[in-house]
Image (cartoon, grey):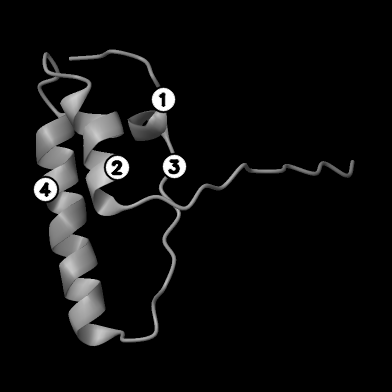
Amino acid sequence: MNREIYLKCYEVTLEEIKEKLVDNFPDSNTRQSRFECFMAFYNDLLSNVKSCVRLLIDGSFVTGVRQN
């Protein structure tokens, strides 16, 4: 069976990611800490791999589903 999956990708800033995926969920118990872990990973990546220009963020973190 041949299945093709197409992802919509958008170029966004880190500020836009935080606004849309963290700040818009003030009641979330997990989004802020997950974003902080992502930023630590991202900063570590940039300090070690100078050629990284794009990251794909996916999963439930990018949905509009409100969970605690």
Secondary element at image label 3: loop
User: Up-down: is 19 above or below 46?
Assistant: above
Q: Residue 63 bears which disc, if any?
A: 1
- Considering every residue shown, the one lying at the far right of the view is 1
Q: Are the residues tagged 4 and 3 within 8 Å (C-beta)?
A: no
Q: Are the residues tagged 2 and 4 within 8 Å (C-beta)?
A: no
Distance between mark 1 and mark 4 Cα atoms: 18 Å
Density class for disc 2 (Cα within 10 Å; few <14, some 14-19, many ≥20) is: few
Q: Is residue 61 left or right of residue 34?
A: right
Identified at 30% across, 31% down, the residue is 20
Give the residue type at disc 1. Answer: Thr
**Quadrant location of the C terminus?**
top left
Viewer-proximal residue among 6 and 10? 10
Q: Quadrant of residue 8?
A: top right
Report the residue marked by disc 4: 36
User: Up-down: is 59 above or below 50?
Assistant: above
Identified at 71% across, 43% down, the residue is 6
Distance between mark 1 and mark 3 Cα atoms: 9 Å
Q: Earlier in the sequence, mark 1 or mark 4?
A: 4
Density class for disc 1 (Cα within 10 Å; few <14, some 14-19, many ≥20) is: few
